[in-house]
């Protein structure tokens, strides 16, 4: 039920001994379920707010196997809202960007304070356009950045080629705010440096939640009675009976090359590390990582909210390969060493989820592919909100639009496949 696999950013890191799974009966004031960026941020903030209280943090999998550690590692400060700049939406754009920035600031502080290496690289992010639709979108994006007075540098095809070492992109923008991370190293680092009043249990799926005061979390070999529960289970909240018809999983996949040799690396652009997000929603996310791998993600599909099988992944790798060759024709001989898939939580109208689900149960999640900085902010704000706090960040999170209704299966499968496939329409060279 909670499968993991051997393909991901975690597999690029040294082996790590997981924490034990939960056994027996526990009674605590606070339980947090889900140890991705949201749950880790919630648990950390609860521990700060309640230094004398015990917090139990549970994850169904080994740390580093959820979406956070399988992301592409872009900690975004400035969101791209596709489809044309609308002046009337400026307060909404600003609200989302305040949340992103709060998350990025929190992550930077936490990584620096804990002193672990997650290849933190805060030199801004590239937004790229290779084909007609994305070039048009680049114009909208520039207008948005200018009107919102966000620091950025418009780039020509020549500028992008010189920096990134690919002639594919015809236009683009460098946004000065934003960071890159090795996502599995980030998640592991955050999990391994939690405050002492947080106890983390791995491979401990919650099978059922019995509501009440206190509520009871039921596991295979034990149970946790807690006064309050913060759920940070992303799209899997649905399995526990929350947000049905509101939240679903979209499965993405990508590949990494081997570590480039000096010769392969020297044929690239001026930058030794960079990350590019496509201005087309179906376009590829591409990175040159600190350890000199090229990483490219360009598929998304509805796969019943599950990771891809070995066979599916091998098939998707052909799509990654085509995109890689288009960008780096001089590196066609460079093999892919890993492929990976991950499932992101999506809503039909692209909103996020934050708030109280019932008397003593709170939830944050579902960030539609942009959750590293935002999830950190949402998780932190959720801990404060559940503790009775008030802040601009909480108000910003609470202002997320209500989620649109998702039809049941089999319409869900059809509708989701259609919606996800339509994201690739006119992706052309950007894919
Ligand atoms: C391939 C891919 C690339 C992405 N790239 C980016 C990117 O570059 N930048 C960006 O900002 N976002 C990106 N995203 C989105 C981002 O990864 C997510 O929005 C974010 O990580 C969600 O964080 P989370 O903590 O809410 O959820 P998750 O990281 O999914 O954590 C939820 C955790 O809950 C646990 N869980 C679930 N059910 C139970 C249960 N019953 N009992 C116990 N534990 C349970 C899971 O095991 C999991 O570890 C990407 C997503 C994918 C899949």
Image (spheres, rainbow, N blue to C red):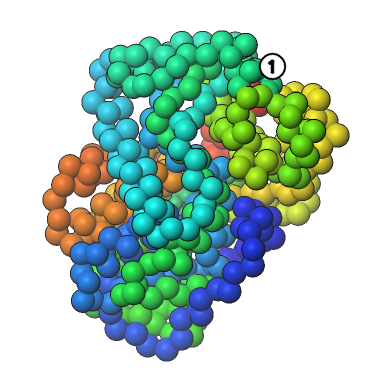
Residue at 46%, 81% in the rendered image:
22
Figure check: 417 above or below 208: above
Figure check: 300 above or below 218: above
Horizontal side of residue 381 vs 22, given as left or right: left
Judged from this view, the residue extending furthest toward the bottom is 24
Horizontal side of residue 48 vs 146, given as left or right: left
Where disc 1 sits, the SS reads loop
Tell me the quadrant of the picture where the N terminus can be found: bottom right
- Residue 384, given in percent of the width and then of the height, sits at 21, 57
Residue 420 seen in render: yes
| Residue where numbered disc 1 is placed | 167
Residue 364 seen in render: no
- Residue 45, given in percent of the width and then of the height, sits at 28, 60
Residue at 22%, 44% in the rendered image:
393
Residue at 66%, 58% in the rendered image:
11
Horizontal side of residue 429 vs 223, given as left or right: right
- Residue 367, given in percent of the width and then of the height, sits at 42, 43
Figure check: 236 above or below 83: below
């Amino acid at each position: 039920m909670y499968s993991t696999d051997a393909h991901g950013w975690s597999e690029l890191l040294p082996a790590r001994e997981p924490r034990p799974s939960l056994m027996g009966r526990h009674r605590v004031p606070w339980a947090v379920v889900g140890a991705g960026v949201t749950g880790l941020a919630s648990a950390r903030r609860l521990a700060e707010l309640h230094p004398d209280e015990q917090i139990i943090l549970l994850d169904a999998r080994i740390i580093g196997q959820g979406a956070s550690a399988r992301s592409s590692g872009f900690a975004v400060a400035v969101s791209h809202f596709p489809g044309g700049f609308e002046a009337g939406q400026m307060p909404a754009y600003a609200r989302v960007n305040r949340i992103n920035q709060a998350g990025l600031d929190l992550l930077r502080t936490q990584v620096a304070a804990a002193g672990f290496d997650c290849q933190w690289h805060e030199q801004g992010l590239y937004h790229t356009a290779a084909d007609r639709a994305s070039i048009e979108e680049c114009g909208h994006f520039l207008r948005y950045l200018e009107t919102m007075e966000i620091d950025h540098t418009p780039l020509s095809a020549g500028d992008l080629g010189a920096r990134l070492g690919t002639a594919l992109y015809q236009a683009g923008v460098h946004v000065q705010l934003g960071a890159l991370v090795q996502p599995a190293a980030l998640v592991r680092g955050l999990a391994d440096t939690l405050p002492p009043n947080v106890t983390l249990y791995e491979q401990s799926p919650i099978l059922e939640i019995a509501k009440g005061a206190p509520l009871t979390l039921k596991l295979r070999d034990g149970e946790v009675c807690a006064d309050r529960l913060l759920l940070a289970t992303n799209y899997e909240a649905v399995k526990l009976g929350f947000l049905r018809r509101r939240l679903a999983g979209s499965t993405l996949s990508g590949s990494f090359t081997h570590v480039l040799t000096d010769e392969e690396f020297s044929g690239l652009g001026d930058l030794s590390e960079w990350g590019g997000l496509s201005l087309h929603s179906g376009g590829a996310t591409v990175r040159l990582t600190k350890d000199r791998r090229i990483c490219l993600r360009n598929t998304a599909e509805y796969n019943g909210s599950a990771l891809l099988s070995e066979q599916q992944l091998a098939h998707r790798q052909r799509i990654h390969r085509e995109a890689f060759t288009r960008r780096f024709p001089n590196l066609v001989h460079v093999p892919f060493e890993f492929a990976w898939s991950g499932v992101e939580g999506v809503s039909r109208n692209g909103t996020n989820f934050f708030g109280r689900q019932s008397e003593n149960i709170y939830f944050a999640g579902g960030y539609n592919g942009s959750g590293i900085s935002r999830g950190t902010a949402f998780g932190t704000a959720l801990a404060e909100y559940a503790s009775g706090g008030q802040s601009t960040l909480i108000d910003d999170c609470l202002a997320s639009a209500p989620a649109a209704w998702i039809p049941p299966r089999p319409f869900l499968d059809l509708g989701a496949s259609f919606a996800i496939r339509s994201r690739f329409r006119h992706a052309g060279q950007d894919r």
